[in-house]
Image: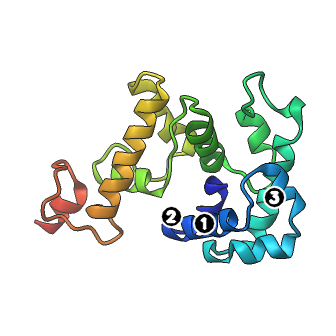
Amino acid sequence: MGAVLTQNTAWTNADSALASLLRAGVGLPADLLAIPRRRLAALIRSSGYFNQKARKLAVISMLFSRPRALTPRGAPSREALLAEWGIGRETADSILLYAFQKPVFVVDAYTRRILSRIGLIHGSESYDAVQALFHDALEPDPAVFNEYHALIVEHAKVHCMTRPVCAGCPVRPCRHRRLQS
């Protein structure tokens, strides 16, 4: 649920929506399918785009209720996730990494911003090309991918924001810092 609720919003908003769902007793795909769509949308209002996200949650819940769509270990394939309305690469990979511990690196706006500022990408590369940088450089270990992504998010929130805070930043080869000098 978090992977859908965090689309186009801050995690704090998604977390608030998750808390509302849990207080209402909605925690499983079957719960999401049983609740009226308007009620679901009202519960997740804090996440923004709540009508669309209510539909996406229903769609993903239907996927999890179809055993043929899942692998023998209970995880959906990336292709099955991407085939669903409203589920893109970042959301699919978030589900696979965080919910099913699959070794897939999640590329988000923070990742793109930092890699662009340190000169590893230009910024127009495809999702798959940016993801390949991590898949090629690191062992396929979900814990490692999770930690790298968490470190990127933390760095982006502390230093590498849209308007960066370069004071105290530990990253030296930064284009933005060179422009400031």
x and y percentages locating residue 154 in the rendered image? 33, 55
Residue at 79% x, 70% y is: 40
Is label 3 in contact with label 1 (beta carbons under 8 Å)?
no
Coordinates of residue 134 in the picture (x, y in percent): 43, 33
Count of picture labels:
3
Give the label, 3 or 2, closer to the camera: 3
**Comes first in the chain, label 1 or label 2:** 2
Amino acid bearing label 2: Trp
Task: Tell me if 172 is positioned left or right of 50 in this view.
Answer: left
Q: Marks 3 and 1, Cα distance to the nearest angstrom?
A: 14 Å
Using the rendered view, name the quadrant where residue 81 is placed. top right
Give x and y (percent) for residue 88: 68, 50
Of labels 3 and 2, earlier in sequence is: 2
The amino acid type found where label 3 is placed reads Leu
Name the amino acid type tagged 1: Ala
Residue to which mark 3 is pinned: 32
Q: Which residue is mark 1?
A: 19
Residue 124 shows which numbered tag? none
